[in-house]
Image (cartoon, rainbow, N blue to C red):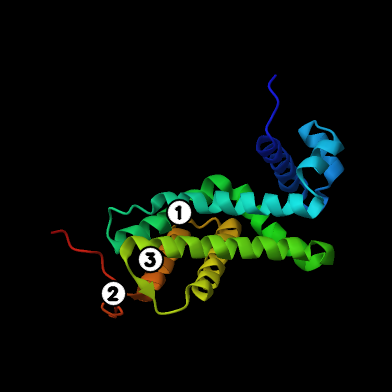
Amino acid sequence: MSRMSIEERRAQIVDAAMSIAIREGVEAVTVRGVAAEAGISLGTVHYCFEDKDAMLRAMGHSVALVASDPVRMALDPTQDLYTIAHAAADGLWQGLTPRRHMRLLTFEFATAGSRNRALRPVARAHLEQTWAMTQGILDQLSEIAGITYSMDTPFLARIVAGYIDGIEIAWLVQQDDEATIRSFHALADYVLSLVVHPDGAVPGPVEPAEAS
């Protein structure tokens, strides 16, 4: 069997940590438990991660990446702004349903951090990663479409991420697919309402582009 690179070993450890967190909760994740889950030594875990917090931060980053991937894949630069924004809304929905356990982990990070002071820095880091990834998507949309927003992007990213969390929590509890899809598309329309075009024009009600 070939030796794993440190990147591969870190990914293995993060996967093991996520398995424990999904099964037992974030607060149940320990270095010893992760080593046992991955079938590796404690020394290997410590070689790859300075401490438990570093391992949890990597896990949080992985969770945020998984959540943002379907949206990034929807940002097709050949499409018009309206189509791209609503494709991103579809990406949010398509990424939610098969990854329910991953979204639960996102909220587990927040609740664990609010309950456990020792985990608060990790929860804060995960929150900041989520905001940064949301801003990255907004920036990518801005670059593709050649537009800006009437609100500073870091603050808009916080608002958008908060909307997404609320929509997803409601779906996890209610399982109302139709309301969730409508909510994601309403969020897309909200972002479009804040678009400023290169000539300084701010759109009114957003309508899909007409076919030429």
- Residue 13: where, in percent of width, then height? 73, 40
For badge 3, the amino acid type reads: Ser
In the image, 170 versus 72, the foreground residue is 72
Question: In this rendering, is residue 84 above or below 50?
Answer: below
Left or right position of 109 against 93 = right
- According to the picture, the residue beneath numbered tag 2 turns out to be 198
> In the structure shown, which secondary structural element does the residue marked by tag 2 occupy?
loop
Tag shown at residue 115:
none
For badge 2, the amino acid type reads: Pro
- According to the picture, the residue beneath numbered tag 3 turns out to be 142
Left or right position of 209 against 82 = left
Which residue lies most toward the top here?
1
Tag shown at residue 71:
1
For badge 1, the amino acid type reads: Val
- Residue 181: where, in percent of width, then height? 43, 59
Q: How far, Cα to Cα, is label 2 from label 3?
A: 11 Å
Quarter assignment of residue 27: bottom right
Please name the residue shown 25% across and 64% down the image: 208
- Residue 94: where, in percent of width, then height? 46, 49
Q: How far, Cα to Cα, is label 3 from label 1?
A: 14 Å
